Image (cartoon, helix red, strand yellow):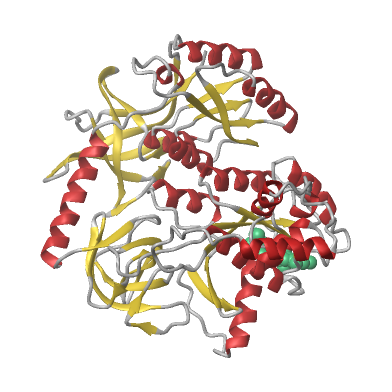
Amino acid sequence: MRVYQLARKLKISTKRLLEVLSEWGIEKKTSLSGLSPREVEEIEQLLKEEAPKPSEQKFPPRDPIVTFLGHVDHGKTTLLDAIRNTQVAKEEIGGITQRIGASEIYFQGKRIVFIDTPGHEAFTAMRAQGARVTDIAVLVIAADDGVMPQTEEAISHARAANVPILVAINKIDKEDANPERVKRQLTRYDLTPEEWGGDTICVEVSALKRKGIDELLEMILLQAEIMELSADPDGELRAVVVESEIDRKKGPLSTLIVKQGTLRVGDVIVGGEVYGRVRALINWKGENLKEAGPSTPVQVLGLSNVSQPGQIFTRAKNERTARRMAEEAREKSRKQSLRRREKVTLESIFSSTEKETKTLNLILKAESQGSLKAVADVLSDMGDENVKVEIVSQGVGEVKKSDILLASTSKAIILGFNVDVPQEIQALATQEQVEIREYQIIYDIIDDIKLALKGMLEPVYTEEIVSRLEVRDTFKISHVGLVAGCYVMEGKVIRGAKVKVMRDEQLIGEGTITSLRRFDRDVSEVSMGLECGVKIDGIEDIRKGDLIEVYQQRRIR
Ligand code: GDP
């Protein structure tokens, strides 16, 4: 028997088993080595005799929450459906299920919670609010396609969140499936399969033919067991929003997963600016629950509004307190949006007097695999004893929303090497206070990083006008201030963009678009030929006939 197989049998990690073996002086260096039946018996006996570790786990165990990540079309949705349908069929609930953003299944008498494929963006957005929802990430890789750009991205996101990765090699029914090639590729990302001596659990599956599903579920349970997840059902309530929508009849609906404590009908809860008395709790099978304990996803009725994924809800004493807390949160977020959040930039990162930041986190985007590798190789050698250069994520292609979110949560700077940065991404970066630096020449990157590491870099900007608006009217709105009714003459205007206000070709002032509305709806962008209401922070004097120039700032050398 192989070491990793024994580890599975004993329900401990391969790493732990190898540790035990070396403690006993048994020379089995890798999990590949074979063990004779006598040795297996001996080890089992020794493990039994090993004094049980004093359990640090004060609370009852909690069921695992799992998210599927991976490249588009590699089969995340099909796999999740296969798991659910098999279970739904087994439980004979007629296949009628609610789409609430998460589901639970029972396998071998144990419960596993799945988050509907949220994509990497949502995965990181949930984390950005400080709520780690996922316990285990299942990385789905199609056996005919292998590791692709979004697979790499998924690995970076899971790693940044410190979530263990389990690999499902899918589509093994296909003629050109090559699971061995996938495993070879995985070794490059430090995800060496167990059977090859590493400690990544890999399961070969076919979502379409429903093959390997049971083994995948078994491995998820095994991983969960190793993690010893626990939560206090009687502790303070902490529930995290997975998704949220407005239903025409029922009003705001939010799916929450309870991480700690127990959520009950009648509870008054508050999360950020949203609060309410829980009128009903509905699970993914459409059943009404009276209460939901740890690791239970439920749709909650009775809240005042929708919330962002990742928002944490807690219990409040009564509705009055909840309302007050929500109002305070609203006031705080308003003030925060006025005050500029501190931004991490290459110039500032090591020039600050307290030399606390010792790691320069980077996200690299390049036009091709070849140049990406070249840049990454150079950069990873650049740190010294004082500062570490860490590449949090790297990928081929333009800078995307998920890059910004990852940069924002991991306080990283994005370096673009001959890649595009779309306008809306630039605006998001401004909003999230993320720095994107663009380069055409590799030596420029090296020079900048060298200077930055010494804290000696000066910023250089260029400005590019991306859209022009004509002010057709202005309004004073109480609590909001001056709003300009504008017509977009050219380009596209985006909330969060920087603007200059011109009157008779004279600069009146500069500011940032903090609110953008079409009719009475908040929107994130408005295109050419349309009218919109604009609130600009930083300028109080706007008049009919003024010209607003929306510009994009790019840092260059
Ligand atoms: P997602 O984008 O990762 O959610 O991928 P989907 O689940 O939408 O699957 C993409 C395509 O691959 C669909 O046409 C599926 O039918 C197909 N597919 C998924 N799993 C398998 C599988 O195990 N075998 C085969 N042959 N096709 C699959």
Visible in this render: residue 298?
yes
Residue 415: x and y in percent read 56, 26
Identified at 66% across, 74% down, the residue is 82
The vertical placement of 353 against 422, above or below, is above
The vertical placement of 477 against 556, above or below, is below
User: Relative to 195, is 430 on the left or the right?
Assistant: left
Q: Quadrant of residue 89?
A: bottom right
User: Relative to 478, is 357 on the left or the right?
Assistant: right
Identified at 39% across, 23% down, the residue is 356
Answer with the quadrant where ligand 1 appears in the image: bottom right
Visible in this render: residue 11?
no
Identified at 44% across, 63% down, the residue is 230
The vertical placement of 180 against 86, above or below, is above
The N terminus - image quarter: bottom right
Residue 213: x and y in percent read 70, 72
Identified at 72% across, 60% down, the residue is 43
Q: Residue furthest right?
A: 175
User: Relative to 430, is 340 on the left or the right?
Assistant: left
The vertical placement of 353 against 274, above or below, is above
Residue 448: x and y in percent read 54, 14
Residue 510: x and y in percent read 28, 24
**2 or 411, which lies in front?**
2
